Amino acid sequence: MKNIITEELGYMKYLLGYKKGVVISEQEIGEAPVNPPVSKKEQNAQAAYKLMIDGATATFGTDEQKIIDGLNKLTYSSQLNRLLTLFADKKTGYSSFTDMIRGEFSKGDDLNKIITRLNKFKYTIKTNIDGDKFPFLKFTPITKPLTDVAPAAAPAVPESENKEHWEDVVKYYEGNTDPNWKFDNKNKDLYDGKMVEYVVVTSTDTNDSDSVMEFWDDGEAYIRNKGQGTGKSKGIWEWEDNKPVIKFKDISKNASGYVQPTDFDWSAVIEDNKVIGLNAKGPLVKQVQNKLIEVGYSGTTSGSVTTDVQGCLDDVEKCDGIYGPTTKEMVKQYQKDNGLAVDGIVGQQTYDSLF
């Protein structure tokens, strides 16, 4: 026993840094090493992941609320990136967050809560989609634990020059003056070498709850997810009649021409700056007609967007592909209902909203 105790004491002396041949009273003993504390950000990310593991592996089916609660624990984009990275260990039974959502959620309120929360982190996911249509999320993997230490100060970045009435725009939306839009946040971002301040507002329309507008201090404005689409439309805000008004460029004056029957791809509109207007024909017109009918703009009492409305809805190839007066009127009505420039022409902005 004596030999064992002697050996153990010798090992402890080695671990604690005792010097051989120096009496204990003269030893210089450093503090025993300790593990660095886990940051609050990392704790939240780990707690969120634990809830998702519990929710996805619950004994009696999926506990969707735990997964929702886990996502609601996150405040910073870095925490979300960390959470999405943790899925690589497959403890949820899935190799990615998207796989878990597709496997555990169907269309409905719970999935909409997930989507609405993710959109707070600048994703642009449409609500009311089927679970198996949930998109894969792009993110920056973070394999090391998060820290609460602030990053080193970066070189000063010049501020953008505020457009006149910018403070009026901020006050207008912070005060929730517009009943159609609800203030979400005011933030800053680095854009084109300058720090740009912007205000984000969300739609109060329950049928278009994922629609978002951004007003930038330099005069630019963006509308995302307006109507049926998931795109982003860019315009310029002006201060008129004591409120901000978004104005879009007149595409009819700047377009390179109408789409042709030989244009089969939307790059004709997105990249070649063509438009679809009165008397245009072809496969892209068929897609417009099909989409208009799908979202409830099939025609007026005097006519329909196509000769066979039901056939066009069931099969896009059964649309007649002729952009007649009724199709134009339905496009104008859709533009009016969705806050777009009303001209009856399908260009970049109407395409973004409609599709």
Image: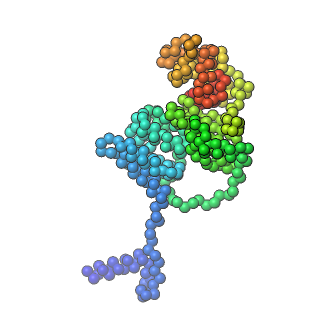
Is residue 74 in view?
A: yes
Q: Locate the C terminus and report the quarter of the image it occupies.
A: top right
| Above or below: residue 251 compared with residue 300 | below
Q: Is the image coloured rainbow, by chain, by secondary structure, or in one colour?
A: rainbow
Can you see residue 237?
no
Residue 49, position as x, y percentages in the image: 42, 50
Which quadrant of the view contains residue 237?
top right
The relative height of residue 191 versus residue 222 in the rendered view (above or below) is: below
In this rendered view, identify the residue nearer to me: 98 or 150: 150
Please report the residue visible at 68 percent of the width from the left and 32 percent of the height from the top.
248
Q: Is residue 342 left or right of residue 228?
A: right
Q: Residue at x 54, y 23 (%)?
A: 291
Q: Position of residue 337 (x, y in %)?
A: 59, 27
Q: Quadrant of the N terminus?
A: bottom left
Q: Residue at x 48, y 60 (%)?
A: 39
- Return the residue nearer the eye: 91 or 61: 61
- In which quadrant of the rendered view does residue 99 lie? top left
Q: Position of residue 316 (x, y in %)?
A: 52, 19
